[in-house]
Amino acid sequence: MKKKKDSVPFSLLDVTTEQFAVFRENHETDNYEFDIELNTTVQISSEQQIVGMLTKFSFSQSTGIVLVLECGCHFGLDEDYWNENIKNGILNLDKGLLTHFLILTVGTSRGVLHTKKPKWLDNMILPTLNVTSVIKEDMTFDITSEETDEEE
């Protein structure tokens, strides 16, 4: 199989559930609407050439947080691509690639929520989200330090 000129070779290496917590005391039984907050973090392991995209969702109602879910997808980048994007010890990752990783991680989070949520939250779902504006620009990482991460 030939590599396309514009393709960025990567592979999904791991999926992690960093945090899953429910707070039944904050759940409004007859209310099926939740405010959803999304936080993202990008982590880099320069030694293993891995990019971790983590999403943290907080589902709240007027009484407080009902559920917190933090998931990560960890992507291995092709060695050539990794090396081509390093200058003076700084790794530059393209906004488009990171947005693609975020889309994959949000979808993975949706599946984790579906399988882990308790029966009393049966109506809770992570809706489709337009995350294309979350990552506003390319990100840079100093890979001379052990591990780095950046939040959006």
Image (cartoon, rainbow, N blue to C red):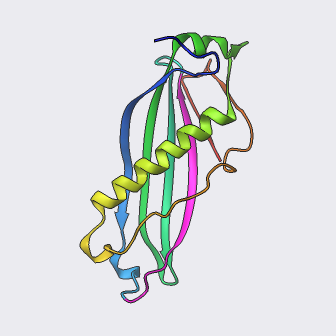
Task: Tell me what residue is drawn at x 52 percent, y 60 percent.
Answer: 128
* 39 in magenta: yes
Q: Is residue 57 above or below residue 9?
A: below
Residue 101 falls in which quadrant of the image? top right
Residue lying at the far front in this picture: please name it. 1
How far across and how far down the image is residue 1, in percent?
A: 45, 12
Q: Is residue 12 above or below residue 63?
A: above
Q: In this view, does 76 lie above or below 74?
A: above
* 6 in magenta: no
Residue lying at the far bottom in this picture: please name it. 30
Q: Is residue 58 above or below residue 28?
A: above
Judging depth in this view, the residue of 139 and 123 nearest the camera is 123
Task: Tell me what residue is drawn at x 36 percent, y 42 percent.
Answer: 16
How far across and how far down the image is residue 132, in percent?
A: 66, 48
Task: Tell me what residue is drawn at x 62 percent, y 17 percent.
Answer: 144
122 left or right of 94?
left
17 left or right of 151?
left
What span is in magenta?
30-45
